[in-house]
Image (spheres, helix red, strand yellow):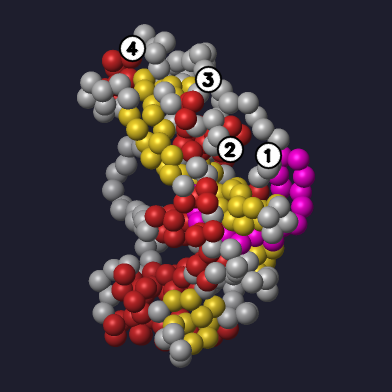
């Protein structure tokens, strides 16, 4: 039988979780996750310090407990949970009820390391650079990255980061980061400098014209009789969005309609978008970055 954690153990785990993935934690963080009084939060921090004194230091200037240099996670954590919380502000809680669904295969396809994910998330939240050993399609090499955002695309978690070697912002799959550590490089490239991230594009998609049940596809998509839907995203993510939605982007809608239920209607407006040209079936692959 599965043991149920006590409320106090859950709070200790939460403190450890924040230290691991955020690098710091205060009473307000604990209060956000449940109906916890200030006094209860304070007792939880005292209990954590008593049990794991080597893991944290108190910073008077920001009134928060900081991850110490000797920090070692006292609990096992789910890196996917940290990414969901930081990327979308989502916290998923399991309820002990009879269930009727099947498990997700996502964890099989996208293996994530707690150590590497925590290095990435702390870099984004605390605005510092990381040096990573990254395995791409063509090589495995060391890169210095300045990450600013997280996103999920092509079934995997990615970061958007400035690559100091290539002198541009690129997308990197987190599971392909083999090693990561903080560096002393200055965090001089921010999200405001990422032109493609800040430039919106509209993707006009419609039920595939060669599908025999086009009306049913419109119903599935909630189009209510309208055969075109406009999706707004940014240039950096446009290719990921079209790929994840299985959109036929060929000029003659030549991809199989049962595999690609949608087709792109404004291809001529998007031929300049690098992420589409590099990632989407129907656009010629470029010799651009291999990240």
Q: Nearer the viewer, mark 4 or mark 3?
A: 3
Q: Residue at x 22, y 24 (%)?
A: 224
Earlier along the polypeptide chain: callout 3 or callout 2?
3
Residue that carries the numbered disc 4 in the rendered image: 213
Tag 4 secondary structure: loop
Question: Could you give the CA–CA distance between mark 4 and mark 3, rounded to whole angstroms?
Answer: 20 Å
The stretch drawn in magenta includes residue 142: yes
* Picture quadrant where residue 291 is located: top right
Q: Which residues are magenta?
A: 135-151
The stretch drawn in magenta includes residue 63: no
Residue that carries the numbered disc 1 in the rendered image: 288
Earlier along the polypeptide chain: callout 4 or callout 3?
4
Q: Is residue 211 left or right of residue 157?
A: left
Earlier along the polypeptide chain: callout 1 or callout 2?
2
Residue that carries the numbered disc 3 in the rendered image: 250
Question: Could you give the CA–CA distance between mark 3 and mark 1, rounded to whole angstroms?
Answer: 20 Å
Tag 2 secondary structure: helix
The tag on residue 68 is: none
> Residue most toward the left?
224
Which x, y percent locates residue 143? 72, 57
């Amino acid at each position: 039988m599965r043991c149920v954690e006590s409320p106090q153990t859950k709070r200790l785990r939460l403190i450890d979780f924040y230290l691991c993935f955020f690098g710091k934690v205060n009473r307000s963080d604990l209060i956000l996750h449940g109906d916890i009084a200030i006094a209860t939060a304070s007792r939880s921090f005292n209990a954590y310090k008593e049990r794991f004194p080597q893991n944290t230091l108190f910073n008077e200037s920001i009134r928060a407990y900081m991850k110490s240099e000797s920090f070692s996670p006292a609990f096992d954590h789910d890196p996917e949970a940290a990414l969901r919380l930081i990327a979308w502000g989502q916290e998923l809680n399991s309820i002990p009820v009879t269930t009727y669904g099947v498990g997700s295969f996502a964890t099989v396809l996208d293996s994530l390391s707690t150590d590497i994910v925590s290095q990435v998330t702390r870099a984004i939240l605390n605005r510092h650079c990381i040096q990573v050993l990254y395995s791409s399609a063509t090589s495995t090499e060391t890169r210095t990255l300045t990450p600013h955002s997280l996103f999920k695309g092509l079934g995997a978690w990615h970061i958007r980061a400035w690559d100091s070697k290539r002198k541009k912002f690129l997308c990197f799959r987190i599971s392909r980061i083999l090693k990561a550590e903080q560096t002393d490089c200055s965090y001089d490239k921010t999200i405001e400098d990422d032109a493609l991230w800040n430039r919106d594009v509209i993707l006009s998609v419609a039920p595939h014209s060669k599908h025999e049940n086009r009306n049913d596809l419109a119903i599935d998509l909630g189009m209510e009789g309208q055969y075109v839907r406009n999706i707004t995203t940014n240039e950096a993510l446009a290719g990921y969005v079209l790929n994840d939605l299985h959109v036929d982007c060929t000029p003659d809608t030549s991809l199989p309609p049962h595999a690609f239920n949608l087709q792109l209607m404004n291809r001529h407006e998007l031929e300049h978008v690098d992420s589409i040209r590099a990632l989407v079936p129907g656009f010629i692959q470029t010799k651009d970055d291999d990240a």
